[in-house]
């Protein structure tokens, strides 16, 4: 019998995902694992997780991981990469962690062109902590701290981190993808592969922003969450390569 697919070695066989139904963390984590497997770098990979749902998968993976204080993953990754330059160091952060609490650390690392990779999960809301409004929450989108929806005059506008980082000189690669359909899942894997290869080749700071869903805090079922991504999230956060200095 021809082998079509096998479980990546980066996921522990005796563990079962605890993510909510429809949550795309599981998909992204699987893609990261497949890329690490295919690049043959499982023994040199180190994940720096942000606080929140992003850190829930540390028990499922078979490569090294460390949890940073809330928002400080890019600062921790900077130190780890300098201490172990041959390692594949990458952060895995949500929008609250990367774009709010850790905004200074995130932008500063990108501005220095640090040679590590950021996987940025943008689902437009805080997850584990209770569905609060995030920097990426859409106008009119309700959150536990914005029960009437995000109002520009009161809360400001959604932050577009890819475009903000594109204003800096140093970043080598910035792409926004999604996992809302099979085609975009494949594009996301391709983007993660490129970002990791950039680091292994010493080409500097790379970030893959992935527009995902949070059915629990959006108050939608998994299928309707996919519609919300297509109809609401992607018009605000268009997919594609924002910068590629190595193309």
Image (cartoon, rainbow, N blue to C red):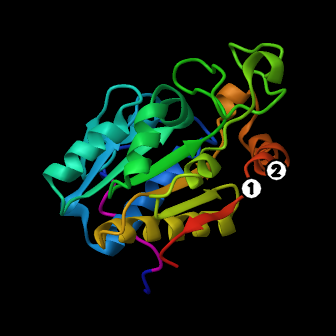
Q: Residue furthest front?
A: 169
* Membership of 18 in magenta stretch: no
Residue plotted at (58% across, 65% down): 243
Q: Provide residue 43's location: percent of width, then percent of height.
A: 18, 61
Report if the CB atoms under discs 2 and 1 are less than 8 Å apart.
yes
On screen, 101 above or below 169?
A: above
The quarter holding residue 35 reads bottom left
Q: Provide residue 205's location: percent of width, then percent of height.
A: 40, 58
Q: Residues within 10 Å of mark 2 (few under 14, many from 20)?
A: few
- Please give the label number shown on residue 156: none
Along the viewing direction, whichever of 186 and 234 lies nearer the viewer = 234
- Please give the label number shown on residue 238: 1
Number of marks present in the image shown: 2
On screen, 235 above or below 174?
A: above
Q: Main secondary structure of the magenta part?
A: loop
Along the viewing direction, whichever of 53 and 75 lies nearer the viewer = 75
């Amino acid at each position: 019998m021809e082998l079509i697919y096998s479980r990546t070695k980066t996921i522990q066989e005796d563990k079962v995902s605890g993510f909510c139904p429809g949550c795309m963390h599981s998909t992204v984590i699987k893609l990261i694992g497949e890329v690490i497997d295919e690049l043959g770098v499982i023994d040199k990979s180190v994940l720096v997780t942000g606080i929140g749902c992003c850190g829930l998968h540390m028990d499922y993976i078979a490569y090294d991981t460390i949890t940073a204080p809330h928002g400080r993953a890019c600062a921790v990754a900077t130190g780890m990469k300098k201490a172990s330059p041959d390692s594949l160091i990458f952060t895995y952060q949500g929008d609250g962690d990367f774009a709010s609490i850790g905004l200074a650390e995130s932008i500063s690392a990108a501005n220095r062109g640090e040679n590590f990779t950021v996987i940025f999960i943008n689902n437009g809301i805080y997850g584990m902590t209770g569905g609060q409004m995030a920097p990426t929450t859409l106008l009119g989108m309700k959150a536990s701290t914005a029960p009437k929806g995000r109002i520009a005059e009161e809360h400001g506008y959604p932050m577009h981190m890819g475009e903000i980082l594109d204003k800096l000189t140093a970043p080598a690669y910035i792409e926004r993808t999604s996992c809302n359909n099979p085609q975009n899942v494949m594009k996301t894997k391709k983007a993660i592969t490129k970002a990791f290869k950039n680091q292994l080749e010493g080409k500097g700071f790379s970030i893959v922003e992935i527009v995902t869903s949070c059915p629990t805090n959006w108050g939608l079922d998994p299928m309707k969450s996919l519609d919300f991504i297509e109809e609401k999230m992607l018009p605000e956060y268009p997919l594609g390569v924002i910068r590629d200095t190595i193309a």
